[in-house]
Amino acid sequence: MIPVCEPLLIGNELEYVKDAVASSWISSSGKYVAELEKKFPEYIGVNYATLTTSGTTALHLALRAIGIGEGDEVIIPAFTMIACAFSVCYCGAKAVFVDADRETWNMNPDLIEEKITSKTKAVMAVHIYGHPCYMDPIYEIAKKHNLLIVEDAAEAMGSEYKGKKCGSLGDISCFSFFANKMITCGEGGIVITSNKNFYDKCRYFKNLCFPLDKPRVFSHDDIGFNYRMTNVHAAIALAQLEKVDVYINSRREHAKLYNERLKEIRGITLPCEKDWALNSYWMYSILIEDEFNLSRDQLMQTLKEKGIDTRPFFIGMHRQKSLKDFGCDSSGDYPVTDEIAGRGLYLPSGSGLKVEQIDYICDTIRALAKNDKL
Ligand SMILES: Cc1ncc(COP(=O)(O)O)c(C=O)c1O
């Protein structure tokens, strides 16, 4: 089976892990934590970073640090990964959904303003599958309504908006280091920001609200979390960061090959790259239109039988029982989200994918499109 995504550990991972273990600095202090918290924000182009245990906890921490709480509303895309909505719920706030744009699959900025109420405190800009959000109107709306921008760049390591890296576009930004992400340490995440106050709040809440200036004093003024990443995980993530440009280039190269081989096939919509965007193609994603021989689900099933693993697109946030039960308004229509959720899938996209594998995947799809006997 060609996996949909496999981590590629081709650098100093083992050496750094051995060093961390040998040094006995295996908990959440140590040189790899310090080094990664320095190098990662430098790479993105912001001032401060704090590591977390996952992308989900990074989002929760970021929202808590900027002051999201009970009674607040946060605007998020209807078409996104569930962690975006859950992180809002963890704060006791409500996630408010905005439908997607048919081309980029990101939140449609034209539909944000109508969702703003006196309770809205922030907009979460999520760069889906590696394509950046169109930020200019989001900046304008945020300024006009005094909203903070939380960037979820979990899927957009290496992506750029008008020459600036995703992760440097919001007031505070989050990444995930889950195994399928551009860089990984198995499980992990990071919050980055250039706002010193938000950074200090993140460090405070992530460490059980131990006082920042007296970390060993057992006096806690607020409810905090333990979202600290270990030095062993940081060792892996640092080795991965050293190779990040290799991974980004290979995903972009793979996308080029996929595009060339799939573009002539009727009924397949390819992923876009707007002229203001650099798409990292974190996951090479396509839509299966009515003109294709098979439905999306039939295609996925047939590809599986041919040894090719795929994943369907996210299901809209308005369709999630958990969020409805929590009290997020799930009424209203999200036609673009529903449409792409039903048509979209992503093909094998790992950085270590071979050209022969891409050829085999595309030949298989082409044959199915023509209804050839394979
Ligand atoms: C857009 C987005 N946000 C948040 C997350 C959550 O990250 P994690 O799985 O590390 O908790 C993911 C993970 O897949 C994601 O794709």
Image (cartoon, rainbow, N blue to C red):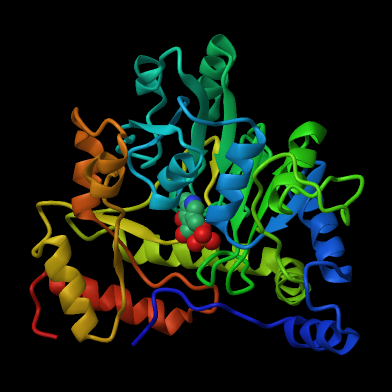
Residue 265: quadrant of the picture: bottom left
Q: Position of residue 156 (x, y in %)?
A: 55, 51
Q: Extreme front residue here? A: 219
Please tell me whether residue 77 is drawn above or below residue 279 in the rendered image. Answer: above
Q: How many marks?
A: 0
Name above or below for residue 116 compared with residue 66.
above
Quarter of the picture containing the C terminus is: bottom left
Q: Viewer-proximal residue, 21 or 133? A: 21
Residue at (10, 52) in percent of width and height: 290
Say left or right for 78 vs 305: right
In the rendering, at what x and y percent does residue 64 appear?
61, 38
**In the rendering, at what x and y percent does residue 214 appear?**
91, 49
Identify the residue at image location x=17%, y=56%: 266
User: On the rendered image, what quadrant is the N terminus found in?
Assistant: bottom left
Q: Position of residue 221 (x, y in %)?
A: 74, 39
Quarter of the view holding residue 243: bottom right
Pick the residue in front: 188 or 42: 188
Answer with left or right where residue 295 lies relative to residue 157. Answer: left
Residue shown at 62% from the left, 65% from the top: 188
**Residue 282 visible to an observer of this rendering:** no
State whether residue 102 appears in this view: yes
